[in-house]
Image (cartoon, helix red, strand yellow):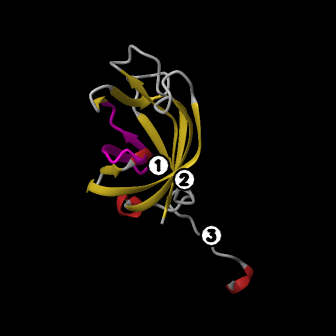
Amino acid sequence: YLGGGYDDITWDNGEASITIDDIVGEYTEVTNCYDKTYDWANWTEVINQESDVTISKIDDTTISIYNFYGWEDTFTAKVDLASRRITVDIKTDWSLYYTFCQYDAPSTPVVGTINDDGTITFDNWTIYYADNKYSYVYSGATSVLTKK
């Protein structure tokens, strides 16, 4: 505040930049969805299910996500830091019968958003059963990962 003015500070076009190392770590995942794996004839509402998730760096644009939705499996994902997006590879023939993908789009990968507060949100994901010939198993799920 010298001379009666204020300095203008800009962080990378108005937003603070992040690196892949900033998103690596241990997270608590909270998921809400409808799930048919509990009862194949009926949807079971899953409210605020928590899982411990680990995100590890593979390289400067690729991460692994371990234990998403408590599955004790590892997913690979590409990170676009400029758009703050995480694109999880479609996992076909996963556990022999499932495809992990975007809801109502078995050939579309799940995309997460890195939020300004550091949380990561995966919206509208699902798994399809048996080569996508049968009804989906999860209904438009939302998962929010918060760093521990």
| Callout 2 amino acid | Asn
Q: Earlier in the sequence, mark 1 or mark 3?
A: 3
Residue shown at 71%/77% (left/top)?
Answer: 5
Residue type (three-letter) at the residue carrying disc 3: Asp
* Secondary element type, mark 3: loop
Q: Does residue 146 belong to the magenta stretch?
A: no
Residue 50 placement, left or right of 97: right
Q: What residue type is labelled 1?
A: Arg
Quadrant placement of the N terminus: bottom right
Closer mark to the observer between disc 3 and disc 2: 2
Give x and y (percent) for residue 103: 49, 27
Mark found first going from the N terminus, 3 or 2: 3
Q: Nearer the viewer, mark 1 or mark 2?
A: 2
CB within 8 Å, label 1 to label 3 = no
State which region is magenta: 70-91
Label 1 Cα neighbours within 10 Å, binned few <14 / some 14-19 / many ≥20? some
**Residue wearing tag 2:** 115
Which element carries disc 1, helix, strand or loop?
Answer: loop
| Location of residue 16 in the rendering, given as x and y in whole percent from the top left corner | 51, 62
Q: Where is residue 140 in the image (x, y as percent from the top left)?
A: 55, 31
Answer with left or right where residue 8 lies relative to residue 103: right
Q: How crowded is mark 3: few (under 14 residues within 10 Å), some or many (20 or more)?
A: few
Task: Indicate whether 41 appears above or below 115.
Answer: above
Q: Residue 84 carries which label?
A: 1
- For the residues labelled 1 and 2, the Cα–Cα distance comes to 7 Å
User: Around disc 2, counting alpha carbons within 10 Å, would you say few (fewer than 14), some (14 to 19), or many (20 or more)?
Assistant: few
Going by the picture, which residue comes out furthest to the bottom? Answer: 2
Label 3: which residue?
A: 8
